[in-house]
Amino acid sequence: MITRRQASAGLLSSGAFAATQTVLAQQAGVRELPPPRSEGGEPLIQALRLRQSTREYADKPLAPQVLSDLLWAAFGINRPASGDRTAPYWRHVMVIDIYAAMADGVWLYEPKRHALVPHLASDIRAQTGMQDFVGAAPLNLIYVAHGERMQDISAEDRRLYASVDTGFIGQNVYLFCASEGLATVFRGAVDYQTLAKTMKLGGGQFVTFAQTVGYPKV
Ligand SMILES: Cc1cc2nc3c(=O)[nH]c(=O)nc-3n(C[C@H](O)[C@H](O)[C@H](O)COP(=O)(O)O)c2cc1C
């Protein structure tokens, strides 16, 4: 067992130190996010002008307020009375969950609490895609569908509608990033089976896409 004192006193190798930081962060439990900003950002037309995919990221974690605003923009609640979201979704059935893979582990975004719930206490960023930048970028969003909630349709249609739901969320993320000067890329080049296993997903769940977010490399 590694203590926090050992870790901070530099008595560990850098690998063990990083692993310890991850475990300590996750042991801290649910991570409340600051309330999302309700104003600011670029006008929509400007964000559309700036929207693009970026594949080079600075090695710098996202500020808590930025993470909060990003997740709210992605698929947060914009109508508290109904609990409805910033993106439309198939048949009013909530299918997509957003997981945030960061250096300190994997977290499930819970829109009702606007909080991150610990899911895995390990850094799996490099396993969220097949391109080198994914392991170094501060955040990889993993979009996961609850296929078992999509009743009375074929497996093919489940994949189709879950992908459409994800695409709307992905575009919200693109526009938010354009507005905030952040870098992002939506990604389909993912080893889906391995990632689902690594994430210990439930039977009906499947990964639809991933999306990297960070500060642009200057
Ligand atoms: C369904 C989908 C899957 C994608 N998969 C990847 C991917 O795995 N890796 C990647 O670098 N870009 C991926 N992209 C980003 C596209 O390559 C990019 O949007 C396209 O080249 C246009 O560039 P732009 O977004 O800068 O306009 C994907 C985009 C979509 C819509």
Image: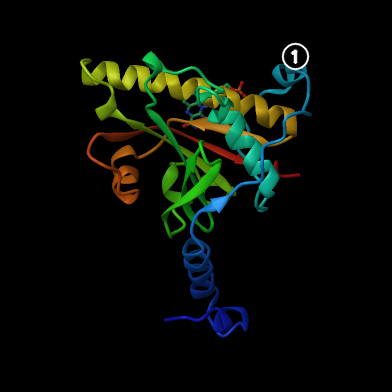
CB of mark 1 near ligand 1 (< 8 Å): no
| In the image: residue 154, left or right of residue 14 | left
Mark 1 neighbour class, 10 Å CA radius: few under 14, some 14 to 19, many 20 or more: few
| In the image: residue 201, left or right of residue 71 | left
| Between 13 and 150, the one nearer to me in the picture | 150
Say if residue 214 shows up in the picture: no
Q: What secondary structure is found at the residue carrying circle 1?
A: helix
In the rendered view, tell whether residue 130 sits above or below residue 92: below
Residue 175, position in %: x, y?
A: 65, 24
| In the image: residue 39, left or right of residue 120 | right
Which residue in the structure is indicated by mark 1?
Answer: 45
Residue 171, position in %: x, y?
A: 57, 22
Residue 19, position in %: x, y?
A: 48, 68
In the rendered view, tell whether residue 44 sits above or below residue 77: above
Determine the residue located farthest toward the front in the rendered image: 81
Q: Indicate the quadrant containing the N terminus: top left, top right, bottom left or bottom right.
A: bottom left
Say if residue 33 shows up in the picture: yes
| Between 60 and 55, the one nearer to me in the picture | 60
* Colour style of the rendered protein structure: rainbow
Q: Residue at x 67, y 31 (%)?
A: 177
Q: Quadrant of residue 9?
A: bottom right
In the rendered view, tell whether residue 205 sits above or below residue 100: above
Residue 69, position in %: x, y?
A: 66, 36
How many marks on residues?
A: 1
Q: Residue at x 29, y 20 (%)?
A: 158
Q: Residue at x 22, y 39 (%)?
A: 203
Q: Amino acid at mark 1?
A: Ile
Q: Indicate the quadrant containing the C terminus: top left, top right, bottom left or bottom right.
A: top right
